[in-house]
Amino acid sequence: MSLAESTPSPSLEEQVALLKQQLAHAQKLTALGELVGTTAHEFNNVLTTVINYAKMGMRHRDAETRDKAFEKILAAGNRAARITTGVLGMAKNRSGNVEPTNLAQLADDTLLLVERELAKHRVAVEKSYQPCPQAMANGNQIQQVLLNLLINARQAMPQGGRVYVRLSADVDQHFVDLSVRDTGTGIAPEVLPRIFDSYFSTKAGPDSTGKGGAGLGLSFCREIIEAHHGRIRVDSTVGRGTCFTLRLPAATPAPAPERGPIPHGAFRGAAGSFPLPTSALTS
């Protein structure tokens, strides 16, 4: 009996699972490719800072100027190290294990990777992290989801705008909420229920940077979050913006935050309370 005859063919379910895994890996490589250009420019900025302050320290012999130069060089070196750590974390093929994860640190690391891309397109970032327990998550996978949401938010604001990253805890349900809200074009109500469908995209073609959409991002985001026993919710108003909220199980019971009245029709989550009448929520 030949080896081919003795090896059973994979079932349809196994083939689909393998294809999904390969597709997810391809999408991850695409995201890494987009980061290469951004991080290369950022490293160039860091090196320029180091070189300029090193020259200043060599020109001026007084202790005060040299101390300032060393402080700037040290800060630039630490920034380069954080960028390297973030890129290597994205590239590393980690296991699928979940563990207590600091979402505030993860959000900061991810924002560092796209900081230059956002600034280049005149997108400002505001952060608000409430005291929260760690979340039970695979940090690498959640970072991929967050990176996808940030890139989508940037593309939804072709004339610039603002991104709000919020972190809060749900005491009653023992969940941690991480949200990304933009002030972009918003999503039409008739389109909103379909945005998590595979191969569906609201992008008609490449934007000004040459980046388009294959309709794979949000469907993979949903699969990742649901595999964490969490949920992903989107609220959007045309002309006002969109908010995606990732709800992940807390590793420990959450501290009780102060809760104010919630206006009728408002969504209260990690991004605070604001009217967003149309929404979609995965179950």
Image (spheres, rainbow, N blue to C red):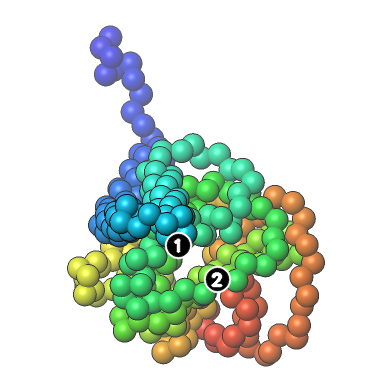
- Residue 111's tag is 1
Task: Look at 40% across and 82% down and name the residue there.
Answer: 161
Nearer to us in this view, 217 or 81 = 81
Q: Secondary structure at mark 1?
A: helix
Against 270, residue 70 (above or below) is: above
Give the image location of residue 137, x and y in percent. Answer: 58, 49
Nearer to us in this view, 2 or 116 = 116
Specify the amino acid type for callout 1: Leu
Nearer to us in this view, 254 or 282 = 254
User: Alpha-carbon neighbours of circle 1 within 10 Å: few (<14), some, or many (≥20)?
Assistant: many
Give the image location of residue 37, x and y in percent. Answer: 25, 57
Question: Which image quarter: residue 255?
Answer: bottom right
Q: Secondary structure at mark 2?
A: strand
Task: Look at 38% across and 62% down and name the residue there.
Answer: 114
Question: Which image quarter: residue 46?
Answer: bottom left
Horizontal relation, residue 124 to residue 39: left or right: right
- Residue 136's tag is none
Question: Which image quarter: residue 245?
Answer: bottom right
Against 200, residue 22 (above or below) is: above
Callout 2–callout 1 Cβ contact below 8 Å: yes
Specify the amino acid type for callout 2: Lys
- Residue 127's tag is 2
